[in-house]
């Protein structure tokens, strides 16, 4: 395990600045990806599936002309029918355009996209196995054997993890082996072994390119969704995450709480001690909250000294307890050494009967102002 870890770290060292140390597992499995990354990657996969399907829908029927000019009538008739079925399937996939940002839906699209040419390859291989082609016909027939190599190369355009690459590449390799096995009586096994090795090598190279794309996306998303000062999520990304969490909570009938946190008398820190001192206070506040956050909680920098804490699967009572744990842990200190305090408003989608992002945040904001009016350094949930 230590050797494997060392090799993995060496490989990641070839991509300095792209992947953080705690994100290395993101290149292996999607289970550690944050919801926002999952959503954006799902949309990207769907768009690329449709783009690739469009390309195949255009090129697949065009090759019928080549078959007519070079292959025997009995052969090209069967292949043309097979191509028309494949074209219809690709055309249907072009029209498929789910906008829910769900990764399983993107997986379904990719599975169909690669299943169509894979089945076409097996079918065409069986059809041509009964014909003895020569000259130009043999050259065109040989071209059909390159379809699995085209499919393997196509993986390079999809940002996939290592496990996802294995899941999608393995059926293509299995189909290639199956096509040869079905024709085992006349198959050249040394030739098959060399071609299978080349196909596996191409799969490895395409997987590396695919994972490199994913690494770039992770780095890009990380730069755009985080507040550069505090490391909390930015307001824009926070809005996206809250919208996504509301959809998931509604589907599951689960609670979702929002805490609106505003630092008390923050303006006086900037006025009396300077903005550098204010920045230091904000960083410390984020660290303190991060220590008490539970798995799945999301901290968003909503404004200058305003933060939004999203707590999925948390009802109003649990949110009250969680926020008071934050207060007991402390938010840090002011530059003069006195404790830093905050006014907090709580809202929960089920208890407050609000399932829209804007009204839910506005209600938490109103309750935060009530906390200010009642003397600050307190939590208001009703």
Image (cartoon, grey):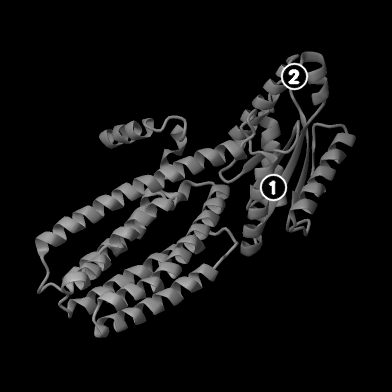
Quarter placement of the N terminus? top left
Give x and y (percent) for residue 153: 34, 54
Closer to the camera in the image, 364 or 45: 45
Q: Is residue 340 visible?
A: yes
Q: Is residue 374 visible?
A: no
Q: Residues within 10 Å of mark 1 (few under 14, many from 20)?
A: some
**232 left or right, relative to 18:** right
Residue furthest toward the right? Answer: 373
CA distance for labels 1 and 2: 27 Å
Q: Residues within 10 Å of mark 2 (few under 14, many from 20)?
A: few
Q: Is residue 80 above or below residue 41?
A: below
Q: Is residue 162 above or below residue 143?
A: above
Instruction: Residue at 56%, 41% (x, y): give it.
Output: 221
Give x and y (percent) for residue 258: 72, 47
Residue where numbered disc 2 is placed? 275
Give x and y (percent) for residue 301: 69, 36
Closer to the camera in the image, 328 or 54: 54
Residue furthest toward the bottom? Answer: 74
Task: Specify which label sits upstream in the sequence, 1 or 2.
Answer: 1
Closer to the camera in the image, 220 or 361: 220
Instruction: Residue at 73%, 16% (x, y): give it.
Output: 335
**SS state under label 1:** helix
**SS state under label 2:** helix
Closer to the camera in the image, 280 or 178: 178
Instruction: Residue at 29%, 76% (x, y): give it.
Output: 69
Residue where numbered disc 1 is placed? 239
Q: Quadrant of residue 142?
A: bottom left
């Amino acid at each position: 395990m230590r050797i494997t870890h060392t090799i993995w770290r060496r490989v990641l060292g070839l991509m300095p600045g792209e992947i953080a140390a705690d994100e290395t597992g993101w290149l292996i499995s999607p289970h550690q990806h944050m919801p926002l990354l999952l959503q954006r990657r799902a949309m990207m996969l769907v768009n690329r599936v449709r783009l690739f399907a469009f390309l195949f829908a255009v090129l697949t029927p065009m090759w019928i002309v080549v078959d007519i000019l070079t292959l025997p009538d009995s052969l090209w008739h069967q292949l043309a029918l097979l191509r028309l079925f494949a074209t219809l399937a690709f055309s249907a996939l072009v029209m498929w355009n789910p906008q829910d940002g769900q990764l399983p839906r993107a997986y379904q699209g990719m599975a169909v996209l690669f299943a169509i040419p894979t089945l076409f390859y097996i079918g065409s291989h069986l059809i041509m196995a009964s014909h003895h082609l020569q000259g130009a016909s043999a050259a065109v027939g040989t071209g059909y054997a390159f379809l699995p190599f085209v499919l393997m190369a196509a993986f390079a355009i999809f940002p996939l993890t290592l496990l996802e690459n294995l899941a999608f590449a393995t059926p293509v390799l299995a189909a290639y082996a199956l096509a040869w096995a079905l024709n085992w009586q006349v198959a050249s096994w040394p030739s098959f072994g060399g071609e299978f090795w080349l196909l596996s090598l191409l799969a490895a190279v395409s997987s590396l390119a695919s994972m490199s794309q994913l690494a770039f996306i992770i780095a890009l998303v990380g730069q755009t969704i985080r507040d550069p000062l505090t490391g909390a999520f930015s307001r824009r990304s926070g809005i996206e995450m809250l919208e996504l969490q509301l959809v998931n909570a509604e589907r599951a009938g689960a609670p979702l709480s929002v805490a609106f946190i505003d630092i008390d008398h923050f303006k006086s820190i900037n006025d009396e001690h300077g903005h550098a001192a204010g920045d230091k206070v904000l960083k410390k506040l984020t660290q303190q909250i991060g220590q008490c956050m539970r798995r799945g909680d999301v901290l968003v920098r909503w404004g200058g000294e305003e933060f939004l804490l999203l707590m999925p699967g948390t009802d109003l009572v649990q949110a009250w307890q969680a926020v008071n744990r934050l207060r007991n842990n402390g938010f840090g200190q002011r530059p003069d050494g006195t404790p830093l305090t905050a006014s907090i408003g709580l809202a929960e989608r089920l208890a407050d009967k609000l399932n829209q992002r804007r009204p839910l945040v506005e209600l938490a904001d109103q309750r935060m102002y009530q906390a200010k009016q009642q003397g600050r350094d307190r939590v208001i949930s009703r």
